[in-house]
Image (spheres, grey):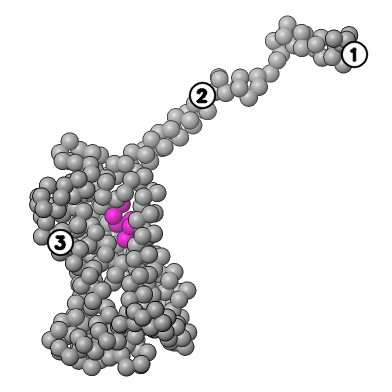
């Protein structure tokens, strides 16, 4: 090695002087070792918030009744306003309906018109379906929410989140893809509400002016009924109740096609929205909705943290 340069010598001399006088300033690593009181308090608060969020994700708190009622009421009010405020682009919606109908027929799955005509021959059946379409969509969904709130409060918030995200995604679909239902297309479809004089749809008859008639894609009758069906299947105790849960979205699919309120592709759209809802809840809570503890905070009274249906055959009956 050669002799040190003049600059190296000066630098070594300054370093030695700083060491003797204690004037060396702490670097990033040193300054982090002795934080002041404010920094310690900020870090403590941040850690507490993160811990609370993790705890809330894995063990949601018991929902508050008044808050949930207000949230559901306001959310549905906003949903109705947004859904019905989307411009009723009749020409665009009819063009989209024609495209969907031709696409289905090209695939050989355009069965809606045949089903519509076949079921319409039994007046008692089609009238019953009209009323089913108008009522159960709300009654069953609200009933499942109440059941979750009372019997599965630890899973309620996550399951409700799935429903809300699903509905929010549907609103985007209504805006971006206005679609006329088959009954408004002509093409030989029967508007069963108008023909039989029932009130099975807010989009037919005297109430048609208060509802957007071109918000058929995606079908929230399918999105909500499938949410109800899966919730009942995974959380109900009795086998026959779980079977009914699975049959409910199947019956709803039959109704929306028989009454010519939707194409089956609208049902596919509803399923996609629901899948997004479940994925969003999974990201928020870090586990699937039905894997959360049954009771808030993982109370000792909770029998299991994973639904027994996931490990017990259907024939086993009760949990």
Q: Which residue is mark 1?
A: 6
Q: How far apart are labels 2 and 3 at the CA level?
A: 60 Å
Nearest-to-viewer mark from 2 and 3: 3
Q: Would you say residue 199 sits in the magenta stretch?
A: no
Callout 3: few (<14), some (14-19), or many (20+) C-alpha neighbours within 10 Å? some
Callout 1: few (<14), some (14-19), or many (20+) C-alpha neighbours within 10 Å? few
Residue at x-position 20% and y-position 63%: 246
Q: How far apart are labels 1 and 2 at the CA level?
A: 44 Å
Residue at x-position 11% and y-position 56%: 239
Q: Would you say residue 164 sits in the magenta stretch?
A: yes
In which quadrant of the rendered view does residue 279 lie?
bottom left
Q: Position of residue 91 (x, y in %)?
A: 47, 88
Q: Which one is earlier in the sequence, the residue at label 1 or at label 3?
A: 1
Q: Is residue 36 visible?
A: yes
Q: Nearer the viewer, residue 70 or 222?
A: 222
In which quadrant of the rendered view does residue 90 lie?
bottom left
Q: Position of residue 191 (x, y in %)?
A: 28, 89
Farthest top residue in view: 20
Q: Position of residue 165 (x, y in %)?
A: 37, 60
Q: Secondary structure at mark 1?
A: helix
Q: Which residue is mark 2?
A: 37
Nearest-to-viewer mark from 1 and 2: 1
**Is 188 on the left or on the right of 29, as rendered?**
left
Q: Secondary structure at mark 3?
A: helix
Q: Which residue is mark 3?
A: 243
Q: Position of residue 188 (x, y in %)?
A: 32, 93
Q: Is residue 63 visible?
A: no
Q: How far apart are labels 1 and 3 at the CA level?
A: 89 Å
Q: Which residues are magenta?
A: 158-165
In which quadrant of the rendered view does residue 83 lie?
bottom left
Q: Nearer the viewer, residue 212 or 279?
A: 279
């Amino acid at each position: 090695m050669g002799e040190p340069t003049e600059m190296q010598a000066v630098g070594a001399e300054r370093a030695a002087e700083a060491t003797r006088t204690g004037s060396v300033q702490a670097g990033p690593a040193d300054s982090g070792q002795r934080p002041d009181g404010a920094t310690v308090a900020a870090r403590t608060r941040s850690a507490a918030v993160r811990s609370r969020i993790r705890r809330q994700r894995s063990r949601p708190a018991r929902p508050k009744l008044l808050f949930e009622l207000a949230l559901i009421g306001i959310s549905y009010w906003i949903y109705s306003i947004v859904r019905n405020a989307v411009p009723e682009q009749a020409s665009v919606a009819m063009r989209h309906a024609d495209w969907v109908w031709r696409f289905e027929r090209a695939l050989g799955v355009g069965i809606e018109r045949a089903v519509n005509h076949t079921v319409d021959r039994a007046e008692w059946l089609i009238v019953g379906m009209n009323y089913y379409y108008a009522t159960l969509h709300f009654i069953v969904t609200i009933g499942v929410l109440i059941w979750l709130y009372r019997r599965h409060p630890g899973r309620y918030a996550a399951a409700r989140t799935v429903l809300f995200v699903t509905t929010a995604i549907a609103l985007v679909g209504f805006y971006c893809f206005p679609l006329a239902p088959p009954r408004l297309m002509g093409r030989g479809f029967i508007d069963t509400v108008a023909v039989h004089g029932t009130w099975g749809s807010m989009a037919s008859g005297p109430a048609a002016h208060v509802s957007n008639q071109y918000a058929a894609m995606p079908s929230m009758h399918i999105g909500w009924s499938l949410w109800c069906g899966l919730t009942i299947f995974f959380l109900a105790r009795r086998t026959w109740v779980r079977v009914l849960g699975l049959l409910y979205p199947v019956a709803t699919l039959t109704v929306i096609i028989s009454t010519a309120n939707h194409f089956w592709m609208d049902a596919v759209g509803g399923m996609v929205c629901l899948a997004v809802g479940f994925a969003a809840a999974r990201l928020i809570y870090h586990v699937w909705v039905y894997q959360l503890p049954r009771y808030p905070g993982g109370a000792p009274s909770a029998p299991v943290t994973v639904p027994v249906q996931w490990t017990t055959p259907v024939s086993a009956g009760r949990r």
